[in-house]
Image (spheres, grey):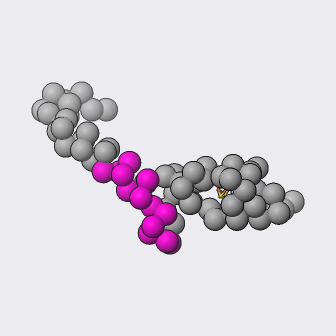
Amino acid sequence: MAGGWGCPHEVDEICTKINSLPCSPGMKGCVLAGRYVFADEAKNARLRGKQAREAAVRNDNPPTADDSANAP
Ligand code: SF4
């Protein structure tokens, strides 16, 4: 059995999802963008934005004494 993942949008190294551009995992519009960290930091903008928004939400709602009392 072969391993690995194959993108259903890739046909002959062309992305059928993004204007028939050459497949470049993580590029803007790619199904993987914002979901994984890529070695090319330019492809991480969406993920970094998501992480910043999540951090802002956490900072707006700091845990209270009641939260720790209800923790399992
Ligand atoms: S760029 Fe992303 S969505 Fe497009 S074929 Fe490659 S892996 Fe799939």
Residue 43 is one of the magenta-drawn residues = yes
21 left or right of 49 in image: right
Q: Residue at x 72, y 56 (%)?
A: 20
Q: Residue at x 24, y 44 (%)?
A: 56
Q: Is residue 19 visible to us here?
A: yes
Nearer to the camera, 59 or 46: 46
- The image shows residue 3, relative to residue 58, as above or below, that is below
Nearer to the camera, 36 or 16: 16
27 left or right of 21 in image: left
Nearer to the camera, 1 or 14: 14
In x, y percent, where is residue 51? Answer: 35, 51
69 left or right of 21 in image: left
Q: Which residue in the rendered view is the most extreme toward the bottom? A: 39
In x, y percent, where is residue 44? Answer: 45, 61
Main SS class of the magenta portion in the image = helix
Q: Which residue in the rendered view is the most extreme toward the front? A: 19
Question: In the rendered structure, which segment of residues is drawn in magenta?
Answer: 39-52
In x, y percent, where is residue 24? Answer: 64, 65
In x, y percent, where is residue 53? Answer: 31, 45
Q: Which quarter of the figure is the N terminus placed in?
A: bottom right
Q: Residue at x 69, y 49 (%)?
A: 17
Q: Residue at x 69, y 61 (%)?
A: 21
Question: Quadrant for ligand 1?
Answer: bottom right
Q: Is residue 4 visible to us here?
A: no
- The image shows residue 25, relative to residue 71, as above or below, that is below
Q: Which residue in the rendered view is the most extreme toward the left? A: 65
**Count of numbered tags:** 0
Q: Which quarter of the figure is the C terminus placed in?
A: top left
Nearer to the camera, 47 or 63: 47
